[in-house]
Amino acid sequence: MLSQEVRIQCAWKRITEWLGENTPRHAEAMNPGVGESLIDAAEEEMPTAVVPAELRAWLLLNNGSTAKDVLDGRFYQPHQDSVFLPGNNVFLDLRRVVDVHRDLLASGADWQPQWIPFAQKSDAPYGYFLDTGANSAQAPVMYFAEAALPQLVFPSLAEFLEATADALEHRSGIRALGNRVQYGPVTDAGMLRWKRVETAS
C-alpha cells in the first residue's frame, strides 16, 4: 500500500500536468517547493501546532499557488490565477498557512490550534483545513466557513487530491462526504472554475 505522501506526489503530478496542458495560467501561479528548514521555522511560529507530514509533502513540491499575487501595503492581493482548487479556493503558501492560522486563532471564532488551513477563498474566510488533532492515522480534510461548524469533506489530503485529479482528467464531478451536490471543472478563457453539476432528478 502506498503511503499518503507518495499518493499526494502522484495525484499532484496529475493535477499540475492537467493544469499545464489545459489552463497554463494556473500552472504559472505555482511557487517552487519550499525547503524543510522553512517548514520547521513555520512550526516554531505555531508553537501549539505541527505541519502534518502530508501537507509538508505537498509544500515540498509546490509552495502554494500565490506566485502572481501582489503586495499592497501589508497585505497581498490574490491574483485570479491563484484560484483553482475545488470550491474555487487558493492553495495557500507556507507564509499564509501561518498567517491564516494565527488570524483565525485570534479571531475568537472557536478555531482550534490543531486545525491547519491549506486552502481558502480569495475574498472570504472560507476554505479547507487539516484536523491534526483528530483521533486517526491521517488528518481529515475539513471545510470551514464563517459562523458555521466545520464539516468533514474528505478522510485525508491524499483522497482530496486524488478526487481532484480524477475530476479534472475525466471532466467529472467531485463531491464532499455527506454532500449530495457535485461540482465539476469548467474552463473558460483559460481559467478553471468549479461549478455545480446539474444531474437528472
Image (cartoon, rainbow, N blue to C red):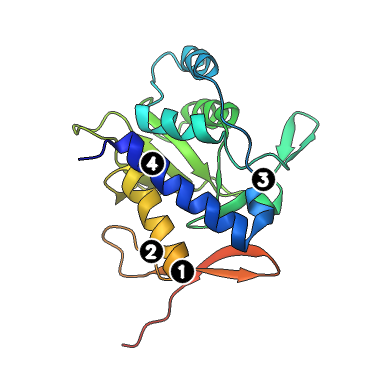
Tell me which corner region of the image, top left, top right, bottom left or bottom right, holds residue 172.
bottom left
Element under label 1? Answer: strand
The quadrant the N terminus occupies is top left
Distance CA(mark 3)–CA(mark 4): 19 Å
Q: Are marks 2 and 1 in contact (CB under 8 Å)?
A: yes
Q: Residues within 10 Å of mark 1 (few under 14, many from 20)?
A: many
> Could you tell me which residue is drawn at 46 percent across and 46 percent down?
12
* Above/below status of 189 relative to 134: below
Mark 4 is on which residue type? Ile
18 on left or right of 25: left
Mark 3 is on which residue type? Ala
Element under label 4? Answer: helix
Q: Position of residue 4 (x, y in %)?
A: 30, 37
Of residues 1 and 42, which is closer to you in this image? 1
Res. 29 mark: 3
Q: Earlier in the sequence, mark 2 or mark 1?
A: 2
Q: Position of residue 170 (x, y in %)?
A: 42, 69
Which residue corresponds to mark 1? Answer: 184
Which residue corresponds to mark 2? Answer: 174
Mark 2 is on which residue type? Ile
Mark 1 is on which residue type? Gly
Which residue corresponds to mark 4? Answer: 8
* Above/below status of 167 relative to 80: below
Q: Earlier in the sequence, mark 4 or mark 1?
A: 4
Distance CA(mark 3)–CA(mark 1): 21 Å
Distance CA(mark 4)–CA(mark 2): 17 Å
Q: Earlier in the sequence, mark 2 or mark 3?
A: 3
